Amino acid sequence: MFQQALAQAATRVQTRLDAEFVRIGDQGPVAEGMAYASRGGKRLRGFLVLESARLHGVDPAQAEFAAASVECLHAYSLVHDDLPCMDDDDLRRGLPTVHRKWNDGIAVLVGDALQTLAFELLTRPEMTYDPAVRVDLLASLARASGIEGMVLGQAQDIAAESAGRPLTLDEITVLQANKTGALIRWSAEAGARLAGADPAALTQYSTALGLAFQIADDILDVEGDAEAAGKRLRKDEAAGKATFVSLLGLEGARARAQGLVEDAETALASYGAQAETLREAARFVISRTH
Amino acid sequence: MFQQALAQAATRVQTRLDAEFVRIGDQGPVAEGMAYASRGGKRLRGFLVLESARLHGVDPAQAEFAAASVECLHAYSLVHDDLPCMDDDDLRRGLPTVHRKWNDGIAVLVGDALQTLAFELLTRPEMTYDPAVRVDLLASLARASGIEGMVLGQAQDIAAESAGRPLTLDEITVLQANKTGALIRWSAEAGARLAGADPAALTQYSTALGLAFQIADDILDVEGDAEAAGKRLRKDEAAGKATFVSLLGLEGARARAQGLVEDAETALASYGAQAETLREAARFVISRTH
């Protein structure tokens, strides 16, 4: 059920993005790079948007604008993260990173314009006629992704490298809640926001999910297969960075992730059987192999 | 009158930005870099927002959110433009550029977060209670600054460098209308949008103003004093790039700019004497020495 919903979400997000890039037209390497960088990936964030929309009776043809938006935001962060002056990665989703395929300057602009497109998508009346709801999604995405959210997490990550000591468990939990957690939270809340409903249960769900996802990522970074992952692994270990695995041990990290998945499932109790796909998603993030 | 209005606008924009950075708090070098990069400058865009707001009876205490927004957007574009992989500049507004003061990675994140903050500022109810107006400003800023506006102009600029021939006058006019024109247009239209009025006259005014501004910039690049400008000059000549001066000659460029200023002044006829400060602004952009 989950795998099917994830695949459907991926198709819907890609169809929306394809339509956007057709509309933008042939504008040279930056527009090409935007399409290239926003292709592929698991589309977990887009899935969360569409699934929380479904829970609240929102038409997927409307919610897809929010799903495509968060995938553009996520893609922008990856393009900039992969730059030589940041993580310096050559491979992403099994393909050369944007700066490797074009160059660093193009990659900076591709990321910049993907961020802009993310916000633009949330202004569309096709998403919801109610401008107050659009502003709510815009404001919450800005807070989740800027210096109070994702970028803060990236800044904390950079600061950790020059701190002269590994991060504590509390510090790394805060860092990840910002760096990857904020956008996952926004995604899961988006359907409730679109319906004008209270997102509290989805906030609780996605806070646990986001942390479980990151712990699983740290486990995969140690145990995973770079070819299946489509990106370089064991970077954290090589850089001597603290991870959930280095702090909790492999077994401890697995137990912590399992506990979080249970928390995530429990948070959705009020949604009943309707939320089974989201519960499956939580179980998936800690069982995935890439 | 203009100089006083410009100085007042600069103070108002800075006060708003200061309040934002106090609210954001001490979040390390990225937050510091955001405050650093958004300080100073002529604040022409912020002035245009506040002046067009005044023409439409909008309280400056509300319009300042849009003024601060466009200045954040502009600052983000400068921080990324100055990167070694882009224009590679060491000096901006008379101070070390962000990547020189910190490093390239911090500069990427500073620009990213300034773009996010620009959009976030336009979501504030303190700007206007009407969410439809906020969405209108958000959507128009996104179009003006992304792959259909400013970033497209930057991409066209990069493409021109590897085109193997200098740009024609038509090509450079389109490039500049995107690269610098779109944001200047948005700024001048913002006051009308805030009041829910037709921005057509201001669109006409600022289209002429934006082009005059760029021609004046090209003239200054040839004739100007790097110390007064606070940035490196004669880059275009060194790079063998076409400019309005190389295409029209110094006298031809001056005459074209003068004609555009007259167009800009005429466009404001319906506003009468009220718009004198904006007319002065047009005369200023071609007479400035830095």
Image (cartoon, coloured by chain):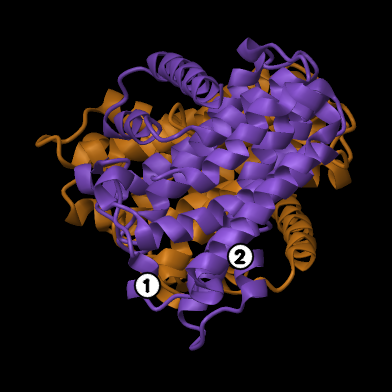
Chain colours: A orange, B purple
Residue at image coords 67%, 73%: B170
Where B246 falls versus A268 (above or below)?
below
Query: Between B34 and A287, which is closer to the camera in this rendering?
Result: B34
Mark positioned earlier in the residue sequence (2 or 1): 2
Residue B204: x and y, percent?
78, 46
Where residue B220 appears, as percent x and y from the top left, is 41, 55
Helix, strand or loop for disc 2: helix
Q: Residue furthest bottom?
A: B164
Check the image and report above or below for B24 versus B235: above
Residue A48 position by quadrant: top right
Q: Give the residue at mark 2.
A: B175
Compared with B99, B147 (above or below) is below
CA gap, disc 2 and disc 1: 17 Å
| Amino acid found under the numbered disc labelled 2 | Leu
Q: In which chain is the residue bearing label 1?
A: B
The residue under label 1 is which amino acid type?
A: Glu
Quickly name the residue at label 1.
B237
- Residue B11 placement (x, y as % from top left): 45, 18
- In percent of width and height, residue B49 lies at 64, 28
